[in-house]
Amino acid sequence: MSDYYPLVSIVVITYNSSKYILETLESIKQQTYKNLELIITDDCSKDNTVVLCQDWLDVNKHGFIRTKLIITPHNTGVSANCNRGYQEAQGEWIKCIAADDCLYENCIENYMYFIAKHPYIRICQSRVQAYINHFDEECRVENTYSLPLIMRDNVNITAYDQYKCLCINNLVIAPSVLMSKKMWEQLDGFDENISMCEDWPMWLKVTLHGEKIYYMDIYTVKYRIHSGSIFGGTTSDLLFKRFFKVDSLVYSLYIKPFAPFYIRFINRYNYQIRYVLDKLGMNKRKLLFRFIFYILNLPYRVVFDLLKKY
């Protein structure tokens, strides 16, 4: 164990999370690293999430340096909810987690050991283990979220290399990210103009400002995929996700003003293919539609594959 022992804030993002929140909180309680602050920020849940959190904190708050439950009278979206939690955090480092995921018990300890050896790091991601619905062995998903070299090589790449790749696809595993509170402040937090997508715009801001996203090759988080959800790609009947409004906002704010022409072109090319196919009713996992999408998307795949290998 390193002598480096800063306060770490764990920020739990909740919204109608009563089904899983206690499991998440118990995983935080079991952390081997003990210099922890726990912030729970709720975005006006309609179920009993807040009651469950308050009851749990009443029993377990003495296991933390500090605890705080943040509530709001109106639903504001995930970006604003994250900002409330990060603003309240007093730790040098912030680990954010959704209220349906869990931390491995040595998650924070491993991160602090890694950062102690690499003190120039300000943001880092790691490996996650995905599960379908439940964190049982039979629900474990093999070989998920394998990152390309450009997001794993801590030596030979630059933040701008990562930025160009992130303009085309979000390659950061958000549940695993650990971020410096000071860096979050310097970047003015998450972009609340994009209320339902906090992560992708932040990674673009991070790399645009010259901060490389480092990688720790250790599992730190159990990530829950909900079957039947559009986020659960293994069970969805959609060929691709319908995030057109988010895509357009991210492009206009973080890609169009800063990215090279060929990056902007391939981003819009992929967007238009998805938009048109969706409008034509072809956003389905049928063999013919998959073939058409594959052929039309070849230029995007070629450029993206080249960028990933840099």
Image (spheres, rainbow, N blue to C red):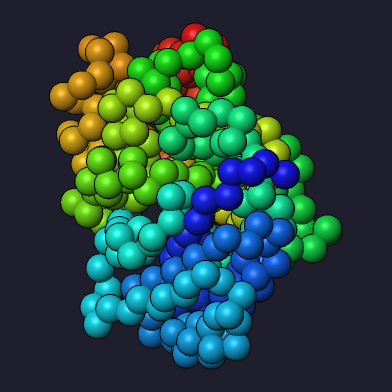
Looking at the picture, how far across and down is residue 101, in whole percent?
59, 61
Q: Quadrant of the N terminus?
A: top right
Looking at the picture, how far across and down is residue 115, in whole percent?
57, 36
* Res. 147 visible in picture: no
On screen, residue 46 versus residue 33, left or right, reads left
Q: Is residue 229 above or below residue 50?
A: above
Figure quadrant of residue 104: bottom right
* Res. 46 visible in picture: yes
Figure quadrant of residue 286: top right
250 or 210, nearer to the observer? 210
At 25% from the left and 13% from the top, the residue drawn is: 260
Q: Is residue 283 above or below residue 295?
A: below
Looking at the picture, how far across and down is residue 163, in whole percent?
36, 23
Q: Residue furthest front?
A: 3
At 77% from the left and 53% from the top, the residue drawn is: 140
Figure quadrant of residue 277: top left
230 or 174, nearer to the observer? 174
At 25% from the left and 41% from the top, the residue drawn is: 186
At 50% from the left and 65% from the top, the residue drawn is: 37
Q: Residue furthest right?
A: 138
On screen, residue 299 versus residue 234, left or right, reads left
Looking at the picture, how far across and down is residue 195, in whole percent?
26, 56
Q: Is residue 304 above or below residue 45?
A: above
